[in-house]
Image (cartoon, rainbow, N blue to C red):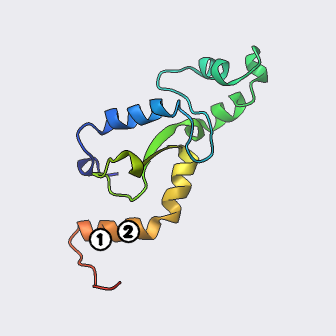
Amino acid sequence: MDRKLYPPDWEAIAFQIKVEVNWCCEFCGRVCIRPGESVEEFCDRISTTDNLDECPVVADFRAFPRRWLMTVAHLNHIPADCDRSNLKALCNPCHCRYDLQQMGRKQLLKRERNGQLRIKGM
């Protein structure tokens, strides 16, 4: 990720979107951990049980914490385009799947940023 391609206030933009969706993935609905939230606080927020050992995500969270992180994706893969219709709050797995499906487009955009011209009609 090349931070120079993002607007200076990207962190604030991304945080606002995550707050708007209440830290839930806009693709799969996964509830994600908030910054500074402990595993215990996270489980209190998402679980109906008071017993931390019975919280369904504790073991998974401790083994794979990145699965529970929220990111913000640019659907068109142009970091400067921060129109809300182009941005989606996604859990890390959904963001990775989306990027993988769009890898050809991402590579094309990178080549163009580096000076390669596109052949007309392609």
Vertically, is 103 above or below 90? Answer: below
Q: Residues within 10 Å of mark 2 (few under 14, many from 20)?
A: few
Residue at which label 2 appears: 107
Answer left or right for 85 relative to 98: left
Residue 38 is marked as: none
The image shows residue 1 at horizontal and vertical percentages of 35, 51
Mark 1 falls on what kind of element? helix
The foreground one among 1 and 77 is 77
| Foreground residue among 26 and 52 | 26
Residue on which disc 1 sits: 111
Q: Residue furthest front?
A: 85
- The answer to whether 33 is drawn above or below residue 111 in the figure is above
Q: Quadrant of the C terminus?
A: bottom left
Looking at the picture, how far across and down is residue 43, in whole percent?
A: 66, 22
Q: Image quarter for residue 111?
A: bottom left
Q: Are marks 2 and 1 in contact (CB under 8 Å)?
A: yes
Q: Nearer the viewer, residue 12 or 59?
A: 12
The residue under the point 46% across, 32% down is 20
